[in-house]
Image (spheres, rainbow, N blue to C red):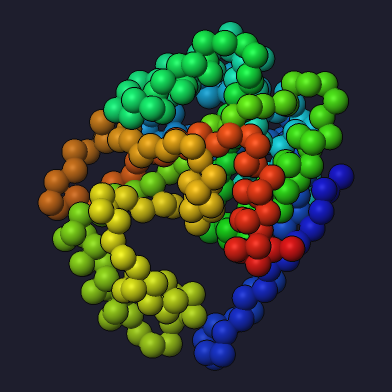
Amino acid sequence: MAKRKTGEDESDSDSDVSMIDVDFDFFNPNPDVDYQAIKRLLVQLFQRDADSFHLHELTELILGQSTIGTTVKTDGQESDPYALLTVINMHVHHDDPSIKALVAYFLQKSSSNPALHASLQNLFSQTQNNVGLVVCERLINMPVQVIPPMYRMLKDELQGDVTGAFRFSHLIVISRTYHLSMEEETYLTNMKSKSPTNKKKKAKAAASNASTMSRPMDGVYSFHPEDEFIMQASSHAIDYAFTAAPAEPRDSESFGLDTRGRLMLVPFEKFEKLVQTMSEALNIG
């Protein structure tokens, strides 16, 4: 059964652009068909460090709690999901090899931020307060507008939980970022400014945003727009480089984004407001 359906229309006044009409269906994770697609989304989320996290076991954890979390599909329940949002209780599953690996990884990556590191050490070393690992990822061409409904459904599922297995004091949200050097940013801005005037409105808007957006001091940008609201609700956050070396060392001639990771620690008491703010900012319900 689909949880709900939403649609996206895209049209342009330019004669060479046709209308796109896509229906997105929201489903619970399906253990019978979603395994490979969810595992691929985890690889995309964790990038070149993904092999460290026992992704088979992590995928099985996600599929083993099929009443919590949401996938987005476009071709019925038996098709592959294009997006995933769920949460895993890191205390309940603390003996699982994937959770053990993630705990060690988070502590190692947070070592450069003493306040965050101390908070994580405290949370992982006791049992009174449960920590939820939020897993959220989507294919590159999926619109951000599918994310607020997924978070609203997750909020409702957590509020409706009667088992106590999803009562959290904090949430850890993992995301992806990319870094641009000054030279790379200048090059991309110049390329966008030379785009033909009859391109899609989205491309023109992206070029305008790139030319007006102020550069972060560290040159690190979010892949996902919703990170802005999660960061605002976080008590601590850190951007980090991946541990595994890239397949080819980056140099001045390298092509492609310098991708990195991000960890955000959100007090659960702020989660409901976060979901509301995210929905309002993205004009969703």
Judge from the rendering whether residue 207 lies leftward or rightward of residue 18; answer left or right: left
Residue lying at 37% horizontally and 33% vertically, measured from the top left? 48
Judge from the rendering whether residue 128 lies leftward or rightward of residue 190; answer left or right: right
Residue 83 in the image: x percent, y percent? 62, 47
Judge from the rendering whether residue 136 lies leftward or rightward of residue 21; answer left or right: left
Residue situated in front as seen by the camera: 6 or 22: 6
Residue lying at 14% horizontally and 53% vertically, measured from the top left? 253
Q: Quadrant location of residue 171? A: top right
Residue situated in front as seen by the camera: 114 or 56: 114
Q: Quadrant where the N terminus lies?
A: top right
Residue situated in front as seen by the camera: 211 or 230: 230
The answer to whether residue 22 is seen in the rendering is: no
Residue 54 in the image: x percent, y percent? 50, 19
- Is residue 252 shown above or below 185? above
- Is residue 166 shown above or below 79? above
- Is residue 267 shown above or below 19? above
- Is residue 70 shown above or below 192? above
Residue 221 in the image: x percent, y percent? 36, 53
Q: Quadrant where the C terminus lies?
A: bottom right
Judge from the rendering whether residue 200 lies leftward or rightward of residue 267; answer left or right: left
Residue 280 in the image: x percent, y percent? 65, 62
